[in-house]
Image (cartoon, rainbow, N blue to C red):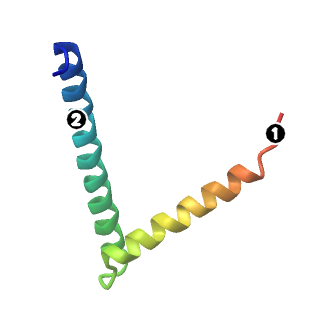
Amino acid sequence: MGSPDDQRECEGLSANLQRGIELTELVFSLRLAVLWQQNPACTKADVLHEICLANERAWQANQTWPTY
């Protein structure tokens, strides 16, 4: 069995993970609401597609940075 410090650390990590998940869900819902205002036919798949495109652009931009 782990020490009390290990238990507290696990509880803290678990709480942080839960907060991260909740924030992700809130941001996803907010973005979907914004897209719905622009186009009521938008779906969750559209939000996921937009996220994928943004990740791709960020990755490509990172590849063009000079390396030192």
Q: Type of residue at label 1?
A: Thr
Q: Is residue 49 left or right of residue 23?
A: right
Q: Is residue 42 left or right of residue 61?
A: left
Name the residue located 25 percent from the left edge and 54 percent from the top edge: 26
Instruction: Please identify the quadrant where the C terminus is shown.
Output: top right
Q: Type of residue at label 2?
A: Ser
Nearer the observer, 68 or 54? 68
Q: Earlier in the sequence, mark 2 or mark 1?
A: 2
Instruction: Please identify the quadrant where the N terminus is shown.
Output: top left
Q: Position of residue 36 (x, y in %)?
A: 31, 75
Q: Position of residue 46 (x, y in %)?
A: 40, 76
Q: Which residue is mark 2?
A: 14
Name the residue located 69 percent from the left edge and 58 percent from the top edge: 60
Q: Which residue is mark 1?
A: 67
Q: Give the spatial CA distance, label 2 vs label 1.
A: 36 Å
Q: Secondary structure at mark 1?
A: loop
- Are dots 2 and 1 in contact, CB under 8 Å? no
